[in-house]
Amino acid sequence: MVMNEIELYRYTECTDLATAAANAMTQGDQETVVVVKRGVRGVTVYEADAAPMDVPAYYSSRVFKIGTGDVFSAVFAHHWGEAGISATAAADLASRSVSAYCETMSLPVETELINSREPLTGRAPSRVVLHGSTCTIGRRYTLEEARFRLKELGMDVHSPRLEESLCNAILEDASALIIADGLSQADIHRLCTSQPYVNLIILDEEGRFDIATFSDFGAKLFPDFASALYHASWPPASLCGLAGCGDA
């Protein structure tokens, strides 16, 4: 069985990962392996009578989500079910393949790209602070959608514009995601300096800004929604020295 955490919890009606995986294997008479996709936290492989094994997520300079779940499942099924390699090794190749596919948006994924993937390492941010404008219904909806999707990735999210009752205390080990639509350059400068963020990500879908304008703050500028969300959620140590600095 290959599924993400939310699907596993709903399938087993259990919210403990290890227990849910064990229950999934006992509910049927054929499931011997449960592969749980955990978004930015990678993959955990459960096998009957074996210790669970973790497989990392891999870095990509951009994140293109359409088809990533299919790529993961197909690559895993081929290597485990047809080539006969271990479930953990097959899941690792699937995770690498998703990373490469996210950058190229093309299939088949080249072997060289799969082998050159860099794993996400280090501690993930404690939470993501989400900034943006709510001056129109559309901009508020975008901010709410970003909050929902970040929570789906397993992140704790604080949005001052959506949750005005929350305090403005310094948030340690937090990332910031700034949605630039509706904000001025001065607004973004102010937000960049408001906290000592471990990741500082700016989503600029309109292409209004130059990254050089914010480079002194250590900010990274992205033109697409999915890439900005994932980079805000990844461990900051994983992004150092890499290019540009699945359903996962």
Image (cartoon, grey):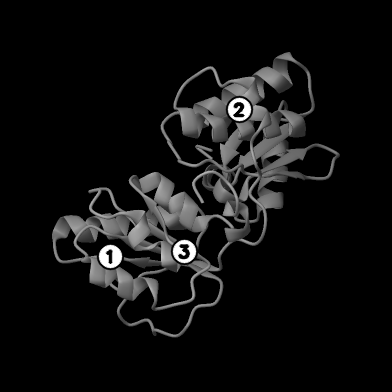
User: How many C-alpha atoms fall within 10 Å of the one at disc 3: few (<14), some, or many (≥20)?
Assistant: some
Q: Position of residue 196 (x, y in %)?
A: 49, 76
Along the polypeptide, which appears first: circle 3 or circle 2? 2
Which residue position is annotated with label 1?
132
Question: Is 204 on the left-hand or right-hand side of 116?
Answer: left
Residue furthest top as drawn: 82
Of tags 3 and 1, which is closer to the observer?
3
Q: Disc 2 marks which residue?
A: 113
Label 3, label 1: how many angstroms apart (C-alpha)? 19 Å
Task: Tell me which amino acid carries mark 3.
Answer: Gly
Which residue is tagged 3?
Answer: 218
Tell me, yes or no, whether the two marked residues, 2 and 1, touch with CB atoms within 8 Å: no
Q: Going 53% across and 67% down the picture, which residue do you hit?
A: 198
Disc 3 secondary structure class: loop
Residue 89 at x, y percent in the picture: 75, 31
Quarter in which the C terminus is drawn: top right
Quarter where residue 71 is shown: top right
The reply to whether residue 55 is in sight is yes
Pick the front one: 142 or 34: 142
Q: Position of residue 112 (x, y in %)?
A: 64, 24
Q: Is residue 96 above or below residue 160?
A: above
Q: Quadrant of residue 125?
A: bottom right
**The N terminus lies in which quarter of the figure?**
top right
Q: Residue at x 49, y 42 (%)?
A: 61
Q: Position of residue 40 (x, y in %)?
A: 56, 49
State how far apart marks 2 and 1 are (Cα). 35 Å
Q: Amino acid at mark 2?
A: Leu
Among numbered discs 3 and 1, the one appearing first in the sequence: 1
